[in-house]
Amino acid sequence: MADHYEVLGVDRDASPDEIKRAYRRLARQLHPDVNPGPDAAERFKDVTHAYDVLSDPRQRQEYDMGGQGPAGGFGFGDIFETFFGQGGRTGPKSRQERGQDALLRVEVDLEDVVFGTHRDLEIDTAVLCDVCGGTCVQPGTSLATCDICHGTGQIQRAVRSLLGNVMTSTPCTVCRGFGTVIPHPCVNCAGQGRVRARTTIPVDIPAGVETGLRLQLAGMGEVGPAGGPHGDLYLEVKVRHHETFSRAGDDLLATLEVQMSDAILGTTATLESLDGPVDVDIRPGVQSAEVITVPGRGITRLRGSGRGDLRIGVQVVTPTKLDGKERELIRQFAGHRKPRPPQFAHFQQGLFTKLRDRFLGV
């Protein structure tokens, strides 16, 4: 059995680039499509097998350790791989592979979070070639059986080892293990069965999403090579900041400024929420940092049913500019009440901290 180095016509200390150049030169001379001679096909197989071994650093090292003479070498790793390696796969592999997953980031407004929203998203992705339909060949042509491996996708040959002659099996380098070649590749997709294109994907974003949440859209990712199954599309959500409302779980939070007179006497206000007007009753004597709860006017729950609440924190506004008449009225009002000078009260965390804690139910 010929030595791999002699088959390629290189020295044993040849560099990987020298081995590659030698293989390419011989492959161009011996390929059956170029050289129809009776010995060309067999020599091409020998050249291909020699290159498969010597181009792989691990296999080359094992080959060199297993034997230096013309009989060639066979390492222990090759022996185990022959009997137990590569998962026992037989036959050619499929050209079709699953497409890659894709990640897309989408921004939504807080209003969209209340009830959910629909978006038509434009993305650049791999789609099925509309000329060949994923077959990879020009219309009217077909795949051809590989002349080297005869459709098996594998090259087998007997190699001498410590255990005697054993059969090795390696992927065919001509058809790359597919068992078929593409004599006339589709010019639209260059024989890939898919092309890059900008496409529109309709997406329903459910209510209750929050920043950082990822939604999985099964089968909406890239189409695989040769028309293989689609991958998945993942949407990562970001909720834009709102000037008036914020969120705590499924509840909406807002702050309501109440004039001092309304805080004393009480009043009713109609406020514009994220989904229409809402009536709010402000009781007489309401204090800053009190929270008014409007049930069922918050966020629709992502998992489950119903909605959270709208929780409104009160902030009593003390007037800073009074005219003479207003100042006199305030003095009269103060004169009718029992005087109580300013004094320390029990320690509390402060208005805004207190308001936050009441919002969060602490």
Image (cartoon, rainbow, N blue to C red):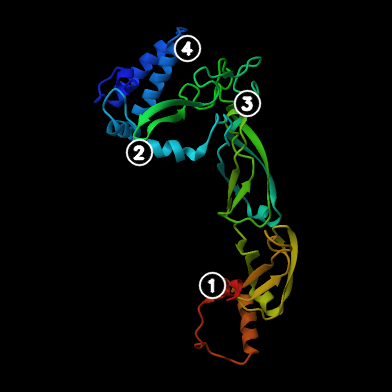
Residue 318: x %, y % from top left: 59, 74
Q: Are marks 1 and 2 in contact (CB under 8 Å)?
A: no
Task: Identify which residue, 236 or 162, lies in the foreground.
Answer: 162
Q: CA distance from mark 4 to mark 3?
A: 27 Å
Q: CA distance from mark 1 to mark 2?
A: 74 Å
Residue 322 pos. (x, y %): 59, 73
- Secondary structure beneath dot 2 equals helix
Q: Which element type, helix, strand or loop, lies under badge 3?
A: loop
Q: In the rendered structure, which disc, 1 or 4, sits on the residue that comes first in sequence?
A: 4
Amino acid beneath label 4: Pro
- Image-based side of 47 in relation to 326, left or right: left
Q: Amino acid at mark 2?
A: Phe
SS at badge 1: helix
Per the rendering, the mark at residue 76 is: 2
Q: Nearer the viewer, mark 3 or mark 2?
A: 2
Vertical order, 351 against 15 (above or below): below
Q: Position of residue 26 (x, y in %)?
A: 37, 14
As drawn, is 273 to the left or to the right of 12?
right
Judge depth for marks 1 and 2 and give the one in front.
Answer: 2
Disc on the earlier residue, 1 or 2: 2
Residue position marked by numbered label 3 in the rendering: 134
Badge 1 local density, few (<14 within 10 Å), some, or many (20+)?
few
Q: Residue at x 25, y 21 (%)?
A: 11
Point out which mark residue 32 bears.
4
For residue 352, the mark is 1
Q: Earlier in the sequence, mark 3 or mark 1?
A: 3
Position of residue 75 measured from the top left corner of the image (x, y, whole percent):
34, 35
- The residues tagged by marks 1 and 4 sit, at their Cα atoms, a distance apart of 83 Å
What type is the residue that disc 1 sits on?
A: Phe
Separation of disc 2 and disc 4 at Cα? 33 Å
Specify the quadrant of the image occupied by residue 53.
top left
